[in-house]
Image (cartoon, rainbow, N blue to C red):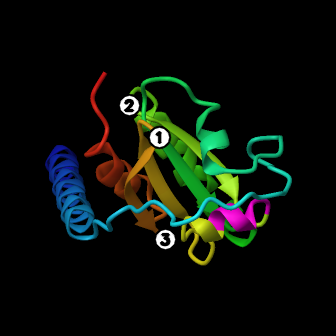
């Protein structure tokens, strides 16, 4: 009887996982928001907690990552930092072969966040490929949602 219950429980977990993964993939497919380039390039001042230095533009930030990999910029609010950090770390680890994930506190770079429409929702993620934005994701905090959405735009290594 124990063996039967154990097998049944294992099948139920597998089925639930499959349903959740399918739902997340569907959600990612229908929630694509077009990325855009801001109309002006304003200079910005501020202290970077995630980057540890001062940067004046997105171009300066992206220049720190010269690899051929896309760069996923995660703008987050200080108020949501603790609740999202584990999922962001999981997403970073799962995407590491295909993209570089960099987190930037919105309060440290308010002008850049506003310029890139990433100042009012946390997290606000923008994937850059060859220095150009290719997709965005707003307020998604579960690592599977992040990986499912962003992974579609990253080349496999």
Looking at the image, which residue is at 40% across and 54% down? 146
Q: Where is mark 2, residue-wise? A: 98
Residue drawn at x 24%, y 55% is 17
- Return the residue nearer the eye: 54 or 25: 54
| Residue 29 position in % (x across, y down) | 20, 62
Query: In the image shown, does 21 or 2 lie closer to the viewer?
Result: 21
Which mark is first along the chain, 3 or 1? 1
Q: Are marks 2 and 3 in contact (CB under 8 Å)?
A: no
Check whether the beta carbons of the residues at disc 1 and disc 2 lie within 8 A of each other. Answer: no
Q: Is residue 50 above or below residue 108?
A: above
- Quadrant of the rendered image containing residue 114: bottom right
Left or right of 5? Residue 97 is: right
The foreground one among 108 and 58 is 58
- Residue at the image point whose x is 38% and y is 31% from the top: 98
Residue located beneath label 1 in the image:
131
Q: Secondary structure at mark 1?
A: loop
Please report whichever mark, 1 or 2, sits nearer to the chain's N-terminal start: 2
Is 88 left or right of 34, judged from the image as shown?
right
- Asked whether, in this view, residue 17 is left or right of residue 67, the answer is left
**Above/below status of 115 relative to 102:** below
- Which comes sooner in the sequence, label 2 or label 3? 2
Determine the CA span between mark 2 and mark 3: 22 Å
Q: Cα distance, mark 1 to mark 3?
A: 23 Å
CA distance for labels 1 and 2: 15 Å
Please give the name of the residue rendered at 49% of the width and 63% of the height, measured from the top-left corner. Answer: 141
Q: Position of residue 43 (x, y in %)?
A: 74, 57
Check the picture and name the quadrant holding the C terminus: top left
- Residue 106 visible in rendering: no
Residue range of the region highlighted in magenta in the rendering:
108-113
Residue tagged 3:
139
């Amino acid at each position: 009887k124990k063996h039967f219950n154990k097998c049944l429980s294992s099948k139920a977990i597998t089925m639930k996982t499959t349903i959740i993964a399918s739902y997340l993939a569907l959600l990612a497919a229908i929630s694509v928001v077009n990325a855009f380039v801001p109309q002006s390039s304003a200079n910005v001042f501020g202290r970077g907690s995630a980057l540890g230095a001062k940067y004046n533009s997105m171009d300066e930030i992206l220049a720190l990552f010269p690899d051929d990999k896309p760069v996923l910029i995660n703008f987050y609010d200080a108020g949501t930092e603790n609740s999202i950090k584990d999922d962001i770390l999981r997403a970073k680890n799962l995407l590491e072969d295909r993209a570089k994930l960099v987190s930037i506190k919105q309060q440290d770079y308010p002008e850049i966040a506003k310029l890139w429409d990433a100042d009012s929702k946390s997290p606000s993620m923008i994937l850059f490929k060859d220095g150009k934005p290719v997709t965005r994701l707003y307020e998604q905090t579960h690592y599977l949602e992040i990986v499912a959405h962003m992974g579609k735009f990253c080349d496999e290594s």
